[in-house]
Image (spheres, rainbow, N blue to C red):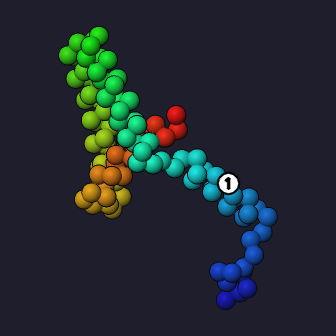
């Protein structure tokens, strides 16, 4: 094994920049459960507005779209190997966590 295979080797300048970029991207796309709760509240508010002004058909369309998105997120998390409440929590974060970025 060469010296470069050692886990404690020093990163070169290119690897340092890549590592920093990855860290920034992870931080930028991080979501929280509080943000997901806020996203759910926003979605419920929008559905209520559609109920008040658009009628039942629009509530079913918008509510169905949200339910479909959550179902797709749940299928993706189960497909990724998560099970049970962990899968539901991850799907909840995927479906409604966008509010963390507002």
Residue 60 in the image, given as x and y percentages of width and height:
22, 23
Which one is in front, 100 or 9? 100
Rendered residue at 67%/83% (across/down): 6
For the image shown, how many numbered marks are present on the structure? 1
Q: Residue furthest right?
A: 13
Residue 59 in the image, given as x and y percentages of width and height:
25, 21
Q: Is residue 5 something that shows in the picture?
A: no
Rendered residue at 46%/37% (across/down): 99
Look at the picture and state if 52 lies above or below 46: above
**The quadrant where residue 51 appears:** top left
Look at the picture and state if 90 lies above or below 98: below
**The quadrant where residue 43 appears:** top left
Question: What quarter of the picture does the N terminus occupy?
Answer: bottom right
**The quadrant where residue 55 appears:** top left
Rendered residue at 48%/47% (across/down): 31
Label 1: state its secondary structure.
helix
Residue 36 in the image, given as x and y percentages of width and height:
40, 42
Look at the picture and state if 86 lies above or below 74: below
Q: Residue furthest top?
A: 53
Q: Residue furthest bottom?
A: 1
Residue 95 in the image, given as x and y percentages of width and height:
37, 41
Look at the picture and state if 12 lies above or below 82: below
Q: 88 left or right of 29?
A: left
Q: Is residue 29 something that shows in the picture?
A: yes
Which one is in front, 27 or 61? 27
Rendered residue at 31%/29% (across/down): 44
Q: 5 left or right of 14?
A: left
Q: Residue furthest left?
A: 56
Query: Which residue carries the number 1 mark?
Result: 21
**Label 1 Cα crowd, 10 Å radius (few <14 / some 14-19 / many 20+):** few
């Amino acid at each position: 094994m060469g010296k470069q295979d050692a886990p404690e080797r020093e990163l070169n300048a290119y690897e340092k920049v890549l590592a920093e970029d990855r860290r920034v991207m992870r931080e930028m796309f991080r979501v929280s459960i509080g943000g997901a709760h806020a996203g759910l509240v926003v979605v419920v508010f929008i559905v209520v507005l559609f109920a008040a002004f658009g009628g039942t058909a629009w509530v079913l369309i918008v509510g169905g779209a949200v339910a479909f998105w959550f179902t797709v997120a749940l299928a993706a998390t189960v497909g990724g190997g998560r099970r049970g409440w962990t899968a539901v929590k991850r799907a909840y974060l995927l479906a409604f966590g966008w509010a963390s970025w507002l």
